[in-house]
Image: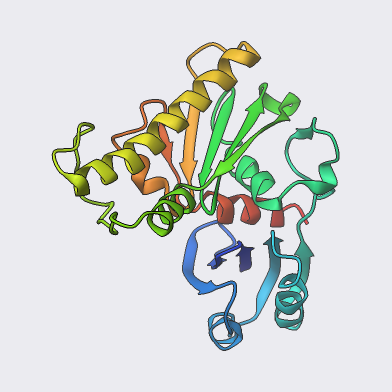
Amino acid sequence: MIGVVDIGNTRTKMAIFESNGALKKEGVVSSKENFLPSAVNFFSESLDRAIIGSVVPDNTPIWADLLVGRAGILHVAGHDSPWGFRLGVERPEALGVDRLANLEGALGFPGSVMVVHAGTATKFDLLEGVGESRSFPGGAIAPGVMLGYEAMLASTAQLRPVDLGKYSPVVGFNTESAIRSGVVHGFAAMVDGMVSRIFEERGIPAPFSVVATGGNSELLKSRARFVTHYKPRLTLEGLRDLAKKI
């Protein structure tokens, strides 16, 4: 079995996969509070191998200490891991491992692929080429949708929180629906605009795949016109696929 830990800025996702790649179980803990009791309970069985992908360096050794006695092989993913694509960016050592794991998870899509990771930040990462010649030339990072939403509420006297999950037309008919429209439709429009500009700049014609993942990707459904696939476990699956190579 393969144990996978994806340490994000807000949440840490955990999963155990069978040797054939099937998901056995998954869980989530906070990246900021005392997560050890829940983590110990989740990884209570022996693992053939375990892998950690982290964008929170202070948390990485804590998880490594937890897993090293439970797994036959433990790997902490980095820029120098055996990814299935070439890194064509400056200073690959500065890349967030979640971005690389997402691209690893997207290798199963044909042709050029854009991964949109809608989390604390919104990340756009491009996978170019075909087969073994695929490469990662770079991408873009924007503030996450919730950061903008929460900053707006904190900076205004009369605007109140709304349920972002409810339907709202683009033209809001009251303050609540206007906020919801601006946040969710504005988010989708930003994603569509960035995807369009990136593919245009790189000269990549349609058809292409745009894969959305991350905790806020649900807000893009039925709103973002260019998103073709939703893969909520893409980061975990990418780390799982990498672990099979270790």
Q: Please tell me in which quadrant of the rendered image residue 135 appears.
A: top right
Residue 127 horizontal/vertical position (percent): 64, 30
Q: Is residue 90 above or below residue 56?
A: above
Residue 171 horizontal/vertical position (percent): 20, 32
Q: Please tell me in which quadrant of the rendered image residue 224 appears.
A: top left
Viewer-side residue, 148 vs 159? 159
For the rendered model, the colour scheme is rainbow
Which quarter shows the C terminus? bottom right
Residue 68 horizontal/vertical position (percent): 76, 78
Q: Is residue 176 above or below residue 131?
A: below
Left or right of 162? Residue 243 is right
Residue at the outermost left position: 173
Viewer-side residue, 92 vs 131? 92
Which quarter shows the N terminus? bottom right
Residue at the outermost front position: 157
Q: Which residue shows up at 75% across the image and 52% down it? A: 245
Q: Is residue 115 above or below residue 162?
A: above
The tally of labels here is 0
Q: Which residue shows up at 70% across the image and 57% down it? A: 243
Q: Is residue 126 above or below residue 69?
A: above
Q: Which residue shows up at 61% across the image and 62% down it? A: 9
Residue 61 horizontal/vertical position (percent): 78, 75
Q: Which residue shows up at 54% across the image and 80% down it? A: 42
Left or right of 146? Residue 49 is right
